[in-house]
Image (cartoon, rainbow, N blue to C red):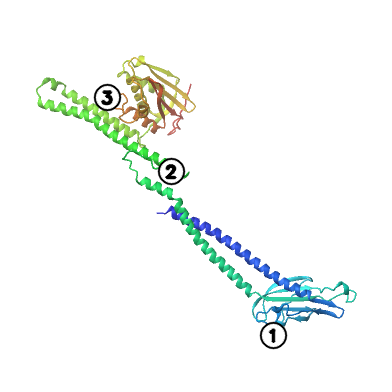
Amino acid sequence: MKSLTTKLMNTMTYVVTAILIIVFLAIDISIDNWVDVEFDNALTDKSNYLKTLVKVTPQGTEFDFAGEFMPEFGTSTKASFFQLWQGNAVFERSESLSHFPGTDLLKKDIPLNSAVFADVTLPDGRSGRAMVAHFEPQVPSSMRELVPHSVEPMWLTVAISSEDLTQILVIIDSSLAIGLLLVIVLMRWAVVKVISRGLVPLNELNNALKTVDVTQKYIPLSTASERYLEIEPIRNELNKFVKISQQYLQTEKRITADIAHELKTPISELINLSEIYIRYPNDQRIGASYKQDVLNISLRMKTIVSNLLLLQQASSDNIHLNRQPLDITEQVNGVIEALTFKYSTIGQRLKMENQLRGCHTLADEFSLNLILTNLLDNALYYSPVQSDIVLRLHHDDNGIALSVENQLLTSLKADDLERLTQPLYQAEQSRTNTERHGLGLAIVENIAKVNGFIFSFGLIAEDRIQFSLHIPHAEPENNMPKTHVSD
């Protein structure tokens, strides 16, 4: 398992280290170049100074050099060297070259009044750097008439040791390398501290999440004293998840208790009937209705179990849908005809506003029939006997819409409205008909969701409620014609 903290620390370390290395390399190269330039400037200054000592007189060219002013060209062990040529003849050599009578300094053919630098090995074997200059001795203006018109050009080579420079550069490079390592170590320590401290809110949230018990009363994850834009959305979503989990858990407990309650009554009735029949087997009043009573109670239990199985199937993604072109008007008329046996006054109470003449849609017939049956059955059952039920059918650019509107026997509270589609929930507790189990709207909601329908409901007045279903246009399956609406 990978650690996010370790990954962040390593990534930050690699990135900052790469930046530091680039910066230190740039600094090192800049310092090296600056030192080389300063070294060459110092060499140039020596060469220019020596050039000023060359004088042209009527008697010829002279070199007025005093060793006490430039002792580095003396006979010390770390001496520097210079050598002058006029034409091809050696004109002057530094005192330090007296120990190397057969050795000449570097001389190059270069243009007049120019100079070049070169790395050389000094006569005493040390590494050095030389500057070769080709110049024309300057004639004082007061003597220009006394000297020949042309003075033969001269070469001057100045060579000094570069070992001290190399040592300085090594010290600089070593210092920079050590500094870089120290900075990387300090940076790594700072990154570890900063990231560890920065992840404290996330660790606190994780620890708070460990203490959450969805079986207990809902308590939101505590909010830290300091809020962070990145942490608060996670905290809020986790709170929502915990709340939903607790709601699902409470719903599961309630459904389990309601199922037990719904089945307990008919089971108790069966036990009581059986005990009475066993105790009084010859009582004609009990024996005559015993079989029919047992059958009725068993059918009620079958209805409850069948509806529960249907609810479970409706909430499953594995439900099989056989979509086919259906005439909505025919489906509605079929449901009305089926409910006529249960509600003999449905013809007088149901007011239908139908704009779907010859309208077809691609849908599962069983699902559509089940939804229409439950909506109309609920509207007829949970409304005053003489009140009207309004069924509206129309279409729009996105599909087909239908709504069922009815008057309520008793007004619904906001809490009742939110729980209306919960399994086994019955808002009207005064109704004692054992055939109502509070599963119809839960089945409708799940069936609509599986089919991709949009199911909604709400109060349109204090004593009136409306249930709406929108069936969007569906793509054809198995080469069936596309959903269409014809006027």
Image mark for residue 435: 3
Among the two numbered marks 1 and 2 on one chain, the one whose residue lies closer to the N terminus? 1
Q: Is mark 1 on a helix, strand or loop?
A: helix
Determine the residue positioned at 40% across, 48% down. Answer: 204
Rendering coords of residue 113 (x, y %)? 79, 70
Q: Distance between the residues labelled 2 and 3?
A: 46 Å
The span from disc 3 to disc 1 (Cα, nearest Å) is 128 Å
Q: Residue furthest front?
A: 68
Q: In this orientation, does residue 467 appear?
A: no
Q: What residue type is labelled 3?
A: Glu
Q: Quadrant of residue 56?
A: bottom right
Horizontal side of residue 176 vs 480, given as left or right: right
User: Which label belongs to residue 234?
Assistant: 2
Ranked by sequence position, the earlier of labels 3 and 1 is: 1
Viewer-closest of 40 and 292: 40
Tell me which amino acid carries mark 2: Ile
Relative placement, left or right, of 429 versus 199 is: left
Amino acid identity at mark 1: His
Q: Is residue 217 visible?
A: yes
Q: Residue 24 location in percent, x, y?
A: 58, 62
